[in-house]
Image (spheres, rainbow, N blue to C red):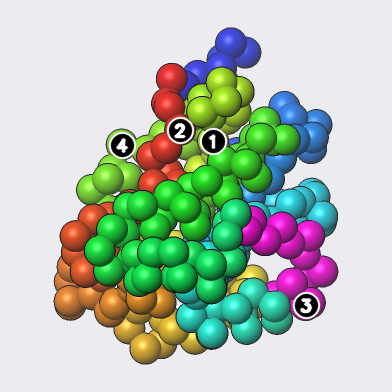
Amino acid sequence: MSVTEAGIDYETMTAEALVAQILRESTGKGVCLTNSFQTEDMVVLHMLKQYLPHVPVIFLETGYHFKEVIAYRDRMVAEWGLNLVNAMPATTLAEHESKFGLLYLVNPTECCRIRKVEPLMRSLEPFDWWFTGLRREQSPTRAGLKKVEDHKLPTGRHLKKVSVLADWTWDQVSGYAKAHGIPELELYARGYTSIGCEPCTAIPAAGADARSGRWGGKKLECGIHTFSEKS
Ligand code: SF4
């Protein structure tokens, strides 16, 4: 969807204007943000929390994150007073590895399904508006992203997925973060450009797509942005 029945074209709106527009339409109810604590998500959170200081911030707690990500998450939760929702898999990491071993090595799609996709599906059920920090530039799989999309969850519920930074470049993201004093996850300074679970994240080759360092180049998406049905 791009143009609403009221004639509002989401695609032509700035990120800030789109955040304000969606919060008017939703009256601030049923809104959440998924946040991996990468800079894009922090920029969207910074915009959202000006209106909704206690917006639910969903973090997929896979058990495999870099210790730097967990430390940064905890720091920002404390400094910004965030309403953090840790989306937990049905099994602990010990149970998971006892049953499957290092599943991310042999079947990363199944590992992501268990530790990311299923917890996210459960976490999204109460919400009608799902904000993300996705950008078209990040990878070929995101090139066709619309700023506001209608998605159907496996339970049949519909919700709107809102990606206000869809048309932003990395320089815009980084510039916004600097201008607003948003601290950056230290892993960027080491050369990481897309940061997920530690075993499945590497520093990409110079000039390659930002997400090419994920899963050893075997895949580009974990499934959390492909499991729901776009309508
Ligand atoms: S990113 Fe890797 S470790 Fe994390 S859930 Fe997916 S396969 Fe498992």
Give me the disc on residue 228: 2
Q: Position of residue 175 (x, y in %)?
A: 49, 70
Q: Amino acid at mark 1?
A: Lys
Task: Pick whichever, 103 or 113, lies toward us.
Answer: 103
| Residue drawn at (53%, 67%) of the image | 95
Q: Residue furthest top?
A: 5
The magenta span reads: 76-88
The relative height of residue 134 versus residue 103 in the rendered view (above or below) is above
- Magenta stretch encompasses residue 53: no
Q: Earlier in the sequence, mark 1 or mark 4?
A: 4
Q: Earlier in the sequence, mark 3 or mark 4?
A: 3
* Disc 3 target residue: 79
| Residue drawn at (59%, 66%) of the image | 92
Q: Earlier in the sequence, mark 3 or mark 2?
A: 3
Disc 2 crowd, CA 10 A, few/some/many (<14, 14-19, 20+)? some
Q: Earlier in the sequence, mark 2 or mark 4?
A: 4
Helix, strand or loop at mark 1: strand
The span from disc 2 to disc 4 (Cα, nearest Å) is: 15 Å
Q: Position of residue 103 (x, y in %)?
A: 34, 65
